[in-house]
Image (cartoon, grey):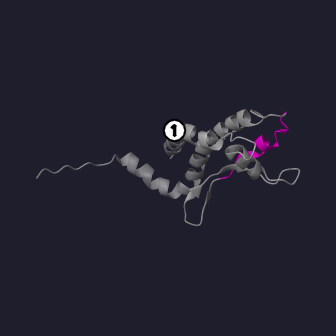
Amino acid sequence: MAKVEVSMPDDFLLRMSHLAEKTDEIVPKVLEAGGNVVLSKVKSNLSSAVGRGTKEKSRATGELERSLGLSPAKQNRNGDWDVKVGFAEPRSDGGSNAKLANILEYGKHGQPARPFLKPAKSSSKKACEEAMITKLEEELRQI
């Protein structure tokens, strides 16, 4: 039976051992790099969805778009890292930005759906992954 042995380069093994010490520092940076790509796509989609296709003049104030943001990367109770694209609450009039976003995304009686979240998710997936890979490689080079 043939035997093959592959050894990792010493510098790579050294960088990987240092990564364990800096995981809590590097992971948030990598997630935020990917999150910013998705955030920009959601903002773009939202701005094109608001006010379009209405029977009456749009009453958009721009508050929904301004409230859109990226949360800091945090570990959840399962130990997984998360970063979220979402809306700050509440609105200046006391209403809910999430409710308005839901109505835009899925529509309501007399108002057709104007999806902006789901298309942003699917269209930015590849670019998000590439941004995270690039940021991870950049962080690894600094070790």
Q: Give the mark count.
A: 1
Magenta-highlighted residues: 57-72
Q: Is residue 70 magenta?
A: yes
Q: Nearer the viewer, residue 41 or 34?
A: 41
The secondary structure type at the circle numbered 1 is helix
Q: Nearer the viewer, residue 32 or 123?
A: 123
Disc 1 marks which amino acid?
Lys
Q: Is residue 60 magenta?
A: yes
Is 128 above or below relative to 15?
above
Question: Which residue lies under the disc numbered 1?
Answer: 126
Residue 89: image x %, image y %?
Answer: 79, 54
Extreme residue in the left direction:
1
Q: Is residue 10 left or right of residue 26?
A: left
Extreme residue in the bottom direction:
77
Residue 86: image x %, image y %?
Answer: 70, 49
The answer to which quarter of the image holds residue 55 is: top right
- State the residue at coordinates (82%, 54%): 90
Residue 63: image x %, image y %?
Answer: 82, 43
Residue 30: image x %, image y %?
Answer: 56, 47
Q: Is residue 119 left or right of residue 8?
A: right
Mark 1 closeness class: few <14, some 14–19, many ≥20 residues within 10 Å: few
Q: Is residue 142 left or right of residue 63?
A: left
Q: Nearer the viewer, residue 74 or 54?
A: 54
- State the residue at coordinates (89%, 51%): 93
- State the residue at coordinates (36%, 48%): 10
Extreme residue in the front direction:
110
- State the residue at coordinates (19%, 49%): 4
